[in-house]
Structure formats: structure tokens, C-alpha cells
Image (cartoon, helix red, strand yellow):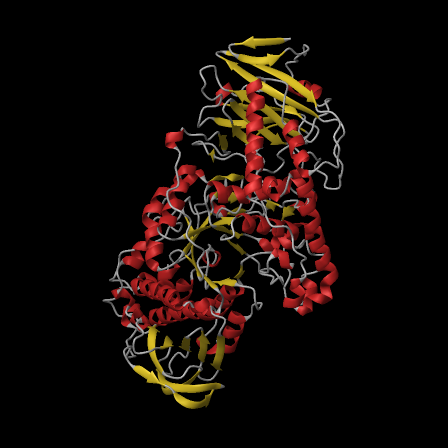
Amino acid sequence: MVYTISGVRFPHLPSIKKNSSLPSFNEDLRRTNAVSFSLRKDSRSSGKLPLHLRSFVAIRYNLGKLSLTILSFVVLGDVDTQKTEESQETDKTCALSTSGSKSYKEDIAEMSQSLDQEVGQRKIPPPGDGKKIYDIDPMLNSHRTHLDYRYGQYRKLREEIDKYEGGLEAFSRGYEIFGFTRSATGITYREWAPGAKAASLIGDFNNWNAKADVMARNDFGVWEIFLPNNADGSSAIPHGSRVKIRMDTPSGIKDSIPAWIKYSVQPPGEIPYNGVYYDPAVEDKYVFKHPRPRRPTSLRIYESHVGMSSTEPKINTYANFRDDVLPRIKKLGYNAVQIMAIQEHAYYASFGYHVTNFFAPSSRFGTPDDLKSLIDKAHELGLVVLMDIVHSHASKNTLDGLDMFDGTDGQYFHSGSRGYHWMWDSRLFNYGSWEVLRYLLSNARWWLEEYKFDGFRFDGVTSMMYTHHGLQVEFTGNYNEYFGYSTDVDAVVYLMLVNDLIHGLYPEAIVVGEDVSGMPAFCIPVEDGGVGFDYRLHMAVADKWIELLKKRDEDWQVGDITFTLTNRRWGEKCVVYAESHDQALVGDKTIAFWLMDKDMYDFMAVDRQATPRVDRGIALHKMIRLITMGLGGEGYLNFMGNEFGHPEWIDFPRTDQHLPDGRVIPGNNGSYDKCRRRFDLGDAEYLRYHGLQEFDRAMQNLEETYGFMTSEHQYISRKDEGDKVIVFERGNLLFVFNFHWTNSYSDYRIGCSVPGKYKIVLDSDNSLFGGFNRLDDSAEFFTSDGRHDDRPCSFMVYAPCRTAVVYAAVDDDDDRSSLVPISLLPEDV
């Protein structure tokens, strides 16, 4: 028997006594035997599917002022666990069906059909044998048991995902099933919350009435409700409506932002965020106009933070960053922009690392469409856009984050102390959980698909890979430190999976991992047995510079400098930096401020006599950055503003913090003064900052022209502790650094590998860069035969104190030496 109301068709159901008590209503639901959309329970040890599958769905019909919630279920019958992958995929579609409205069933079928078609078009290559790492590094053979087990776990997980989910490609599209999904007939909302005893969808659209839209639960802890369109065809939930899920949990009744929410905002005067149903009209949605740029051979990253990118003490916007900062990055010569703090985070001063809403771009800076416009503009300028993604931990907020989401300690995270990072005061994911894997893999893909990011910088990877999280541990390079009981194999396998996913779907994508431990095979492809990153952040270099800046010049050891810069694994690429955002946080300061300190307040005008401290600081600032780029890695990174020697430090607005023991940590009265970038200083030609900025621009242009960072040829021919001189070859260039504080050397012989004529292509002492013009940049240098510093030929140079000079072998018709002066290059981009 079928009833029809205003064109909405639904089956006659046995009467259900509806109690006004929300928990008792859902207690009735929990007596049903339902099936997960993933067709398996959360336990990864379960290898069989249930024999009798029943899908339970709550459907809400909006009929003018009348709101009616009905329930239906369908018995799917016996399931043969030996079915082919195609039939298993059909089972998943059946599991989503209901015996309710025909239009709803058709919509689900269309979604499934679309999924099947795309799975056929985009497939991730199967795993390799994982053995090549032993040829690359024979020392790994002594840890073959651990590494083979690790790769075996990875292969096993890939096989299980293929068997139960239709493959990694389909598994990583959780955002098309969970959270809010829109179809032609209405909105479906699904949430995995196995610990909840009852759940309702609440929000502006139903006046926050927990009894209006009660959700149904299946055996796998997935709650669901379908909200058909209104009678006039409009959406049941208007765009911009605030939404939350109310759950009866073991910890009590709680309202939470949906875990898969795509946008959330903080209402004025309130602390917790609210989830927002974001679905603008078609004409208001941003449409990408420009293709992704090709992956650059040499990666030169401009690390940035949208909120603090204004010269004014305020939170900047995606739109202003797009219009004002991106052209600046392009003009400076960088080819990639890395953006921090994209994922929503309730605490601004966390620098974006205490994420609360993983699928939502930060609303402080604008709307999701504003972010898309920013990325599209970067692509127009030829810049690849990397996202600083956080999968290493999460905010411990319970009201607007994932912590205690379903009222239990161990839903997304490890329970107990293992799930808490005592230094970061945050929660740690359980990478051995099936649904956590779905969530994080889908999250990585979401940002690539929806926003067209070109890759990621994965934060806190060292913390992920070890159960001790790298805390109070000093890595010495002994392989026993990497392959033992302290290694979190589940986390490493997740990293292998996510790198497989990213590179499988987007071969041009760039993935950088923040690892300080030096994990072997970190940057070797997964199919060969590695973890799969493209680059490792060479974090030890920045720490070394801070260590040296605390010493006298006389105590700097040039051998120590070169060792730190070159101490990286052969065949695994690194992104190196002299300083990132980390080094300038409150409590520390920028390299420029370490060098020049308070003199930067009064002696940076070019028409005023500089102090010895300023002269030293400007000279060493250029040398530190050039030798870092020249010798330290295959990619280079700079945090915004540091290219011109940004003064002081970074300090987000903070209020006084009162600790439980009575202590008070003073804030800064909510000030934004140190949470901005003074780009005006670098642009002012009457200030010495401008010379530093021009030198950084010249560095980027030098690398773009000669591509020395990606050259396999690197040879240090001299590291003289007495002279404080370093000479090395990188690619076709010859670098000469004189770190001595007073000694300049005339007729100083340097060895080289290529005979012929050399010219200066970069001179840190050029007056354009705030130098003293002690060299003739038009001079030509001719080699003489005879070995010197173990090189086949040599020539003589003048090496002034505290200078860095780069020479290139040139032919008479070689126009690449026109690099200098860089300021004469065209200003337009």
C-alpha cells in the first residue's frame, strides 16, 4: 500500500510509537541490523561481511509547514563473500538503497553510477614488490625483517581496500558519502559516530529542534538522514545556515560540528565555532579558469600565512593576498607558494596547527570561493600552490573539533595517553582505524580535487612515525633508531597510502614531509619500498644557523657549516631553508634581528651611517641565505618577509592565560603588531631592507637561469678554517664564500673543474644589494692548468671579507651573465 502527498511517494509502514525522548527513540533504531556504507565494521581484523544486510534510513519530508520523518528498511538477502569486485560494488549501491521514494532511489543510483565511471577512468597503480630500497641502500638489509613487515602491511591494506571498498580511488572519496551531499531531490547527511546512542541534525533550518530531524543508525555506527527538497523545489537547508549534530553520548548530550563540514564560522562574541551548510547558487560559485602549472624542476617555495600577510595590524583576506601578495611572490622569482593555516582552526595563535575542521578552509580569511580564486590567480601567474596540511594531530577541542566527537575517547584518536601529545596539547590519530584512514585519505584528496592545490607540505611527520613522537630523543643516524618497537608502523603505512593516492591521481603533485629524524627511504617511491615523499624538509640547517648566531664570528667553523648543509641522504631530495616561520615565533627572532637587533630601529636608512653591527648583519644575512640555497638541498624555502630581513619576531594576538595551578602566562593585549608582514620596508629604496630584498630576487633568478639546485654535480674543493673560506662547485657554477670578519684576500687561487673564461654572475658586495662595491663585476677570469684543491685547473680572484661571489664559465656568446644587475630586469611579471 502506497501513500502520496504533494507528489512525494513513500511506502506504507507499520506504525512506530514515537517517544518524545530522543534517546529512547534511537534505542529502538539500534535494535535493527543495518549495514555500513563501507561494508565492514571499524575493526580491521574483521574479514567477512554480514550475511543479512539491512539498510536503515531516516527520510524527512518538507511539505510547507508540515515536517514528517519516516523510516524504512530493505532486506538485501544473502551475500556471497567470494563475489567479484564489480558485484561487491553493486552490493554497496544496494546497501544505500531504501524502499522509500523512487526519486531518492534514482538519485542514489546516479551517484553510484558516476562513482563507478570515474573509478574506471582514474586508477591508482598496484603496489610494487618494495625491494628496490635494498639496492639503493644495502645497509637496509640488516633491517629487512622490519621493512618487509612494513611493506607487507601496506600491501595487505591495499588488498583489503580493493576488496571491501572498490580500491583506493573509491575509498578516498568519503566526502561524496559522508557529511552533507546534495542531489537533485534533496540533501543526505551521514556521520560516523559509533559511540552515540541517538543523533539529530539541528540548525537554523529547523529552529535547532532536536526532535525535528532524528537520524537513523546502522550496525557500523553510521547515522543518516535524508532531507528532500521543499515543495517549491528549494533546498531543505538554505545556503549559509548554521548546522550541528546533537548526540546522546556516553559523556552526555552534546552538540558538535559535523566532522566532514566544508565551512565553519565563529559568531561574533562567541567562542565555539558553528558549522555552516555551504552551497551557493551556481552563478555564485567560483569557476577555475587557468590550468595547473607544470611541476617545476627546481622548487623555490615562498612560505606564507594569509592572515598575517598584511602590512597593517589585522587579519588579511584571501582576496587581498591574491591581489597584493601573489604578484610580489612572482616578481621575487619564486615558483611555488606554500600556504599555512588553511584548515579551520579555532585558536588563531596555533599558526593553524590545532585543526578543528579538516575539510573547511579558514573562514577568518574569507569564503571557500575566495580561496579558489586565490589559487586560480596563482596558477595564472605560473605558481604552484602547496598546502601546509596537518594530519599529525588535531585540536583537543570537544565543542568544535573531533575530540570526543561521539562521546568516546578513541573514535578518531588513540585512547588514553597514547592519544595525547603532551608538548602540543593535542590529540593523536589512530592510523590503524579503517574509518580514520578513510577520513584522512579523503581529506588529502578533497583539497586537491575541490581547491586544486598542487601538493602538500605534511606537518609533524616525525611525530607520526614514532610512538615517542621525537620528543626527548636525539637521532644520531643509527638505523636501529628508525626500525624498531618505537616505530609506529600504522602511521608509516598511512603515509605510504596517502603518497600513493596523491601521486597516483596527480603525478605532477609535490609532497614535502617535515621530518627531522632522517628516516631512511623517506623520499623513495612507495613501489620501491619507500615512504613516498618527494622532498624532506632539511630542518637541521636552520637550527645550525641559530646555534652559530649565538657565537662569536671567530668561533664559526666552516667545516661544521658545510657538514650540516650536506648531511643528507643520497638520492633523497631535500627542501632547505635558513629560517622558516618556526625560527621567528615569539621567544625567538628572525635571523636579521639576531644579527642586527635594536640597531634595525635606527640605522637602516641608506642616507645614514650604518653601525658595524648593521654592516655585519647585512653581509652575513646574504651569505647565510646564498650558501643555504647553494649547498643545502634540491629545493629552497623562505618564509614571507624574511627575504628582506624582516625585523623582530612573530607573535599572534594573545590574552593572559590563567593556569589551573594559579600561574598566569601574560599575553600581548590581543595585539596584531607582530602578526603582520612589513612589506613596505623591503619596497622602500631609501632603506637597507631593499638591498636585501633585491639580493634574494637575484638568488632566485640565478637558480632559475642555471638550475644548480637540481644538478647532480656538487663538490666542495675548499673549507679553510684559517682563512674562513668555503669554495664549492654546484652545477656549472663556482661559489666562493669568505666568512672572515676582517681579512680580504687578493690573488686568491680557487680550483675549478671546467677550463676557460669565467665571469661573476652574482656578487653579494654589489651596492645594489647594500654592499661596498669592492669587486669589478665586469672582470673576466681565465683558468690556468695544474691541479689545485684537487681540481684540474684554477684561477685567481679577490675575495673581500664577508662576501659571497658566484662565478660561471661562459662563452663569448653566452648571455646568461646579464643576471647582474638584477635591478635592471623588467619590473613587470
Q: Residue 736, position in %: x, y?
A: 41, 78
Looking at the image, residue 577 lies above or below residue 314? below
Residue 626 shown left or right of residue 173 in the figure: left
Q: Name the residue: 31% across, 73% down.
A: 817
Is residue 70 shown to the viewer in this render? yes
Above-or-below relation of 159 to 57: below
* Quadrant of the rendering where the N terminus is positioned: top right
Name the quadrant containing residue 188: top right
Where residue 513 appears, as percent x and y from the top left, is 55, 56
- What's the residue at 65%, 63% (across, down)? 132
- The residue located at (36%, 84%) in the rendering is 797
Is residue 803 or residue 97 the one in the foreground? 97
| Quarter of the C terminus within the rendering | bottom left
Residue farthest along the bottom direction in this orientation: 786
How far across and how far down the image is residue 747, in percent? 36, 88
State the residue in front, 192 or 45.
Answer: 45
How many numbered marks are there?
Answer: 0
- Answer left or right for 663 relative to 252: left
- The image quarter containing residue 738 is bottom left
Q: Which is nearer the eye, 118 or 60?
A: 118
- Expressed as whole percent of the image width and height from the top left, the position of residue 326 reads 35, 51
User: Which quadrant would residue 71 be assigned to in this image?
Assistant: top right
Q: Is residue 413 above or below residue 302?
A: above
Q: In the image, is 392 to the left or to the right of 745? A: right
Can residue 611 be seen in this snapshot? no
Q: Please give left or right for residue 158 compared with residue 546 in the image.
A: right
